[in-house]
Amino acid sequence: MDSSITASSLDALTQVYQDITQNLANVSTVGFKRRLNELRLVQDGTEGSVLGGTIEVTSVLDLSQGHFVHTGRRLDLALDGSGFFVIETPEGRLYTRNGQFNLNGDRQLVDFAGRTVAGSGGPIVLPERTSLQDFHVARDGSVWVKGTSIGKLQVVEFASVSDLIPLGNSNFRAAADVEPAPASRVTLRQGFTEAANVNIVEELVGLIQVTRLYEANFRMLQTLDEQMEQILNVAMS
Amino acid sequence: MLRAFSTAATGMTAQQMTVDTIANNLANVNTAGFKRSLMDFQDLMYVKIAEPGREEAAGVLAPNGLEIGSGVRPASTLKVFTQGEMENTGRSLDVAIEGDGFLQVTLPGGQIRYTRDGSLRINATGTLVNASGYAFQPTITIPTDARSIGIGKDGTVSVFAGSATTPTTVGTLQLVRFPNPSGLSSEGGNLFAETPASGAPTTGTGGTDGFGQIQQGFLERSNVQMVTELVNLITAQRAYEINSRAIRAGDEMLTTANRLIS
């Protein structure tokens, strides 16, 4: 272990710490997906050297299912399985797992910011003279009012987690040149929201680990410093 | 490190707001026609350090990017308009709406407000008013010699006046509905006001076109579920704690770093 590994691993640990705080801050965010961290030693390529190198951290979105929370709101929809709701915005389509929707003044299904939730045949509009109590979303995403189908919610899935770029506000956008496919293994649950998939205990363990590793690395740096001082003392005396 | 501190701080603020909302829900557990609120949170913007799919070598794309989130923000409070429990009060001037709809009252300034609290009163001039004295729309006047008052499922108000043996209709309680009731603004005093988000009200008669039925002798209780709120309260408290714990961990890391320098 030399000082460059120690310094870079300190940077990496700081980053892991930041991701953990981000996960914890969003423990109540509907549809939030946590980040997992992976530390990796990158060799600098010098022949025979095992010491030189830097530690890199890669953080990966963990798309595992969050648990379901019953709210009883007819416009709360949760996705069970892999998939995303599609939100139409002037800047293009966004994807989200947050299914806490609303109706706007034109009785259209919209997200928290008033942007249209995409249906396979255009936006979902609740017909006049019907009430929210009549609004039923079947498990396949088809929307029914008093026994009449008024459309189907579009749910899509991505081939790889790296096709998704988080934008905040529970929204993702697709990476360049990626076109999601209709989701095949997903069911919808009405009256539920999907909780964040953050596990407090796991994050707490991570937090303790990071703190202790950080301490250990600093101690290593301190030892290296003292050794260097001793060598210098011998050389100079 | 400092960024992580503010990230954890946004988490604490968010939980504080949840506790505020729960406290208000619990305080109104006995308020007729009260609708509970939910907090809706969203993650904040991500700081992009490296884009996923960047070219690391000719033809080799990095499978993962590096983005660091900056916390959480409260996006909105959602009013949950589920039906509250119906309580039989036996009072002839109590009405509950079973299903969709609001009653309308006029403020002294002439503006219209909407309520699900159907605890009616008669004021000095015989007009039907709510607990604050605001007249219901359309105005209904009860004759001074009325012996008993009947309110039908469609909102028709009829009285037996004087020595009459047949009831006389004196007016109808009209219901209104909004495309997006969650978008109504809460005004206190069990009243809601129209906003651009709620859409324009449509008027109708109880029991028709999807409007709820009016039940005389009942009051709609608050839809707050004590146990649900308490469970949410504990969750919020623990989430607050864990976020403060994250700040403490960062503080420990900085202490370690400081020890080296000294």
Image (spheres, coloured by chain):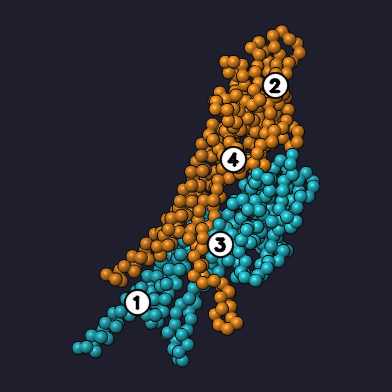
Tags 1 and 2 in contact by the CB under 8 Å rule? no
- Per the rendering, the mark at residue B195 is 4
Q: Which residue is mark 3?
A: A167
Q: Circle 1 marks a residue in which chain?
A: A
Q: CA distance from mark 4 to mark 3?
A: 29 Å
| In the depicted structure, whether residue A202 falls above or below residue B106 | below
Tell me what hue chain B is rendered in.
orange
Q: Badge 1, how many Cα within 10 Å: few under 14, some, many 20+? A: many
Q: CA distance from mark 1 to mark 3?
A: 37 Å
Amino acid under label 4? Thr
Q: CA distance from mark 1 to mark 2?
A: 86 Å
From the top left corner, tell me how far across and down residue B106 is, in percent.
Answer: 59, 27
Q: CA distance from mark 3 to mark 2?
A: 55 Å
Q: Which residue is mark 2?
A: B171
Q: Residue at x 34, y 76 (%)?
A: A221
Q: Quadrant of the N terminus of chain A?
A: bottom left
